[in-house]
Structures are given as structure tokens and as C-alpha cells.
Amino acid sequence: MYFLGIGLLLMVLKYMEIGPVATWSWLIVLAPFGLAMAWWAWADGTGYTKRKAVERENARKQARIDKNRQAIGTLGSKKRR
């Protein structure tokens, strides 16, 4: 995602001819888009994307379980008094 943001920023700076980017080659300005495509291809090909999604899902699931266990424990201690 960072590559896309950098690419968009560089593209706008080049198009509007702002700063030193105005003198750069379009190949250099558009390079972050190629890097983003390479990153996504690598991430999808190696399973990195799926692994991160599963990790986030497991973390949310564990947080929900911990919250429910805490709520049950709190309710149990109130009834004992």
C-alpha cells in the first residue's frame, strides 16, 4: 500500500511539475507501481496475505474468548458475595 501512495504522490508531482520530480524520468516516477505489483505477486504466491488474515482472525477470536471468560468470571464472583 505504501508503494501505491508513493507512486501516486510522485505521479502528481511529475504531472504538476513540482520540485525535483519534474526533471525525473517517467520510468522512475512509475517504478513504485511496478514494485507494488511485485510485492502483491510475492505476497499472494508465498501465502503471506492469507497467513496474515488468519492471524488477525485468530487474534479477534481469542480477544472475544478472553472477554467472555472475563465476563463469566466477573459474574461468578458477584454472585458468591
Image (cartoon, rainbow, N blue to C red):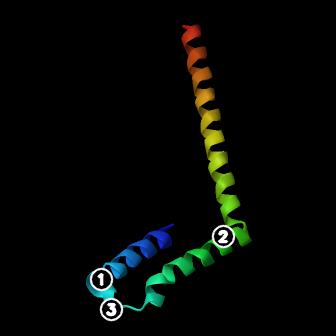
**Do the numbered discs 3 and 2 sit on residues whose CB atoms are within 8 Å?**
no
Residue that carries the numbered disc 2 in the rendered image: 43
What whole-number distance in Å separates the C-alpha atoms at marks 3 and 1? 8 Å
Earlier-in-chain disc, 1 versus 2: 1
Pick whichever, 69 or 12, lies toward us: 12
- The residue nearer to you, when weighing 4 against 70, is 4
Splitting the image into 4 quarters, where does residue 79 fall?
A: top right
What residue did someone put label 1 on?
17
Question: Mark 3 belongs to which amino acid?
Answer: Thr
Dividing the picture into quarters, in which one does residue 11 lie? Answer: bottom left
Mark 1 or 2, which is nearer the eye? 1
SS type, badge 3: helix
Disc 2 is placed on an element classified as: helix
Residue nearer the viewer, 16 or 5: 16
Closer to the eye: label 3 or 2:
3
Comparing 77 with 12, the one in front is: 12
Cβ–Cβ under 8 Å for marks 3 and 1: no
- The x, y position of residue 17, in whole percent, is 30, 83
Compared with 60, 75 (above or below) is above
Q: Amino acid at mark 2?
A: Ala
Which quadrant holds the C terminus? top right
Q: Please state if 15 lies on the left or on the right of 5 as rendered.
A: left
Image x and y of residue 26, in percent:
44, 88
> Few, some or many C-alpha atoms within 10 Å of disc 2 (few <14, some 14-19, many ≥20)?
some
Toward which corner of the image does residue 49 lie, by quadrant? bottom right
Distance, label 1 to label 2, CA atoms, is: 34 Å
First reached walking from the N terminus: tag 3 or tag 1: 1
Q: Which residue is mark 3?
A: 23
Q: Amino acid at mark 1?
A: Glu
The residue at 48%/89% (across/down) is 27
Q: Which mark is residue 77?
A: none
Lower sequence index among marks 3 and 2: 3
